[in-house]
Image: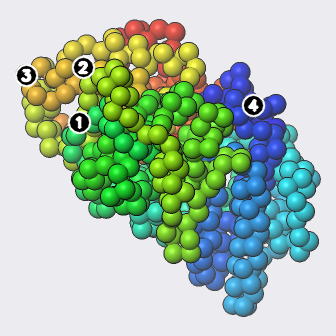
């Protein structure tokens, strides 16, 4: 196997024997095969759309969901990838039949293989092969021929890495689009853009570095629309987040922990547990849920439990209820809790029950609820015994932040607020990530910090006090990683007030990336022309020094100085 799609990749170069995340070579091969077959399906869908005006919603939804399943820490179950690959070929046959019925044939060039597919045919041609696929063993064998190695050999490391940059950006934006779709918000252009880019990766033009980079920034542009769509999906369904204290202390009673990013699932769970006496606790990136009026109104949304994703084995093992996994980041479970955990949507773990939506999209969380009722939950004694923690405050989406904008602007103009930091992104277990913990310590008291993503867990329970002369907290959490849109709205509005651009504001972006959604957000920021972004703790392994050089020249992208956060702070100030 060879996978270097996330920041924690082995040795900063690539996971080759087993993933640092726990991904096996077999699952890696199946994921590679899935991306390969989806490139073929997307190529066909692109032709169907452009040549015959055929739009197939099942294909559109599938493509985004399938590539979402290959994100880091989403799905480790080989049987689920076998299903995805078979579904891809089934949908390919369905769409081919529609085209044939419409009398539209594909140009021969549509399925001409490219050197970077190695010994494999063009994925569109492979999908169309009549022979049925064998079992999982056959798929793994074929999948092993569809990995990065063939692309590196044919294109060289820089171009192969930039093709991966595009693929990973597409994975991230597809994940966000899929979340919005769960709440009923879709955009035909987003499906078309994703599929056009996947099609592009199968054409001779994808051997041109400039064309690949253009597609990366185009993906960034599409992702901006997707993040806006997701923001609208969240706020129109659940209302705009409002500042809300969240308890980190449990209450007596049966308990369910919900993790991941999917607010729709949380809503369904709150509905299905209403009146059962079960309390629901958020974990990880679900923390911002407490700020939404449409979710916080449920009295049994009892609080938040645990820290960032990489601590889940410790946190989940001591949780006395069942655990619902809606999206990443999920890890191979310990025996201590493997009978309590359930996956939903694109997530998957070998041997762990998975809850599927029925034909009309309903999900029955009955198994999760029944397991919670079997488990002890929190007793009054537990609650008494556990050390008491202070509440944390969430809910500073763009609406809430802009409502205090006049005070922030006044503070900037009067010199009481010297600088704003946006420390966004993910957390992880590597020691280099201590850079972010230290960075916060070096922030002068006349500065503010906006956080988003699971990186906030390094400081989310610390008291940063208020901005001098105001009652505005210095630390404002804007939400999940996908709420980067809120930060962009705030930055754009501030720039308007000061009659300048985002790059000229007293604002520094220091991003901690981990997986492919962060790649999508980075591409969006670059597409918007945001410069001087610090990126860490390590630069992506898929970008060669030559590719990094292009980004440094064009955008002054700055590698985080993890060895010396004080120096970075000085430079940002
Ligand atoms: Fe974190 Fe995981 Fe939100 Fe990521 S939970 S690391 S970028 O998947 O999604 O911030
Ligand atoms: Fe390694 Fe990350 Fe790929 Fe997992 S997702 S195999 S940790 S590079």
The image position of residue 451, as x and y in percent, is 35, 32
Describe the element under mark 2 as helix, strand or loop. loop
For ligand 2, the image quadrant comes to: top right
| The C terminus, quarter of image | top left
Residue ID for mark 4: 15
Q: Which residue is mark 2?
A: 464
Distance, label 2 to label 4, CA atoms, is: 39 Å
Q: Does residue 123 appear left or right of residue 56 in this picture?
A: right
For the point 60% across and 73% down, which residue is it? 58
Q: Secondary structure at mark 4?
A: loop
Quarter of the figure that contains the N terminus = top right
Q: Is label 3 in contact with label 4 (beta carbons under 8 Å)?
A: no
Query: Which image quarter: residue 475?
Result: top left
**Mark positioned earlier in the residue sequence (3 or 1):** 1
Instruction: Determine whether 11 is above or below 25 in the image.
Output: above
Give the mark nearer the N terminus: 4 vs 1: 4
Mark 3, ligand 1, within 8 Å: the answer is no
CA–CA distance in space, label 3 to label 4: 51 Å
Q: Secondary structure at mark 1?
A: strand
* Residue receiving disc 1: 245
Q: Residue 351 versus residue 549: which sits nearer the camera?
A: 351
Q: How would you rate the neighbour count of disc 2 (Cα within 10 Å): few for under 14, some for 14-19, many for 20 or more?
A: some
Q: Earlier in the sequence, mark 1 or mark 2?
A: 1
| Ligand 2 within 8 Å, label 4 CB | yes
**Residue 469, disc:** 3
Q: CA distance from mark 4 to mark 1?
A: 41 Å
Q: What is the C-alpha distance between the residues marked 3 and 1?
A: 22 Å
Whole-Å distance between the Cαs marked 1 and 2? 15 Å
Query: Mark 3 or mark 4: which comes first in sequence?
Result: 4
**What's the CA distance linking mark 3 and mark 2?**
14 Å
Name the mark nearer the viewer: 4 or 1.
1
């Amino acid at each position: 196997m060879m996978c270097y799609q996330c920041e924690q990749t082995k040795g900063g170069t690539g996971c080759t024997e087993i993933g640092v995340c726990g991904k096996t070579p077999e699952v890696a091969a199946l994921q590679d095969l899935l991306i390969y077959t989806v490139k073929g399906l997307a190529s066909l869908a692109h032709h169907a759309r452009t040549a015959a005006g055929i739009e197939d919603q099942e294909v559109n939804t599938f493509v985004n969901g399938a590539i979402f399943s290959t994100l880091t820490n989403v799905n480790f179950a080989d049987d689920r990838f076998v299903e995805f690959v078979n579904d891809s070929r089934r949908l390919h046959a369905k769409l081919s039949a529609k085209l044939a019925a419409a009398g539209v044939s594909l140009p021969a060039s549509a399925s001409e293989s490219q050197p970077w597919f190695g010994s494999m045919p063009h994925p569109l041609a492979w999908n169309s092969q009549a022979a049925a696929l064998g079992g999982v063993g056959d798929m793994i064998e074929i999948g092993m021929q569809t990995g990065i190695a063939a692309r590196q050999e044919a294109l060289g490391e820089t171009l192969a890495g930039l093709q991966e940059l595009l693929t990973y950006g597409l994975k991230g934006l597809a994940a966000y689009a899929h979340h919005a779709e769960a709440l009923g918000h879709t955009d035909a252009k987003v499906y078309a853009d994703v599929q056009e880019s996947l099609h592009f990766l199968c054409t001779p033009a994808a051997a041109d570095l400039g064309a690949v980079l253009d597609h990366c920034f185009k993906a960034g542009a599409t992702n901006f629309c997707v993040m806006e769509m997701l923001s609208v999906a969240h706020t129109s369904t659940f209302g705009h987040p409002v500042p809300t204290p969240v308890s980190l202390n449990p209450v007596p009673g049966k308990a369910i922990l919900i993790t991941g990013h999917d607010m729709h699932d949380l809503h369904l769970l709150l509905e299905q547990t209403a009146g059962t006496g079960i309390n629901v606790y958020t974990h990880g990136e679900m923390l911002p849920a407490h700020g939404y009026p449409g979710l916080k109104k449920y009295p049994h949304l009892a609080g938040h439990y645990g820290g960032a994703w990489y601590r889940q084995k410790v946190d989940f093992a001591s949780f006395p209820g069942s655990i619902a996994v809606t999206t990443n980041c999920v890890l191979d479970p310990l025996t201590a809790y493997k009978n309590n955990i359930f996956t939903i949507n694109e997530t998957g773990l070998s041997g762990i029950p998975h809850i599927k939506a029925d034909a009309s999209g309903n999900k029955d969380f009955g198994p999760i609820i029944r397991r919670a009722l079997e488990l002890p939950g929190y007793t009054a004694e537990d609650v008494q015994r556990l050390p008491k923690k202070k509440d944390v405050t969430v809910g500073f989406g763009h609406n809430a932040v802009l409502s205090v904008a006049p005070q922030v602007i006044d503070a900037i103009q009067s010199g009481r607020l010297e600088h704003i930091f946006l420390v966004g992104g993910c957390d992880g277990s590597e020691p280099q990530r201590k850079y972010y913990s230290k960075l916060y310590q070096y922030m002068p008291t006349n500065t503010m910090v906006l956080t988003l993503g699971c990186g906030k867990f390094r400081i989310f329970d610390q008291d940063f006090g208020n901005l001098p002369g105001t009652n505005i907290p210095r630390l404002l959490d804007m939400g999940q990683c996908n709420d980067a849109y809120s930060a962009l709205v705030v930055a754009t509005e501030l720039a308007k007030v000061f009659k300048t651009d985002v790059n000229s504001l007293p604002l520094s972006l220091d991003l901690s990336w981990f997986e492919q959604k962060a790649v999508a957000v980075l591409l969006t920021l670059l597409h918007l022309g945001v410069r001087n972004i610090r990126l860490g703790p390590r630069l992506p392994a898929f970008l060669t020094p030559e590719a990094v050089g292009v980004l440094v020249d064009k955008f002054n992208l700055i590698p985080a100085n993890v060895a010396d956060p004080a120096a970075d702070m000085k430079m940002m100030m």
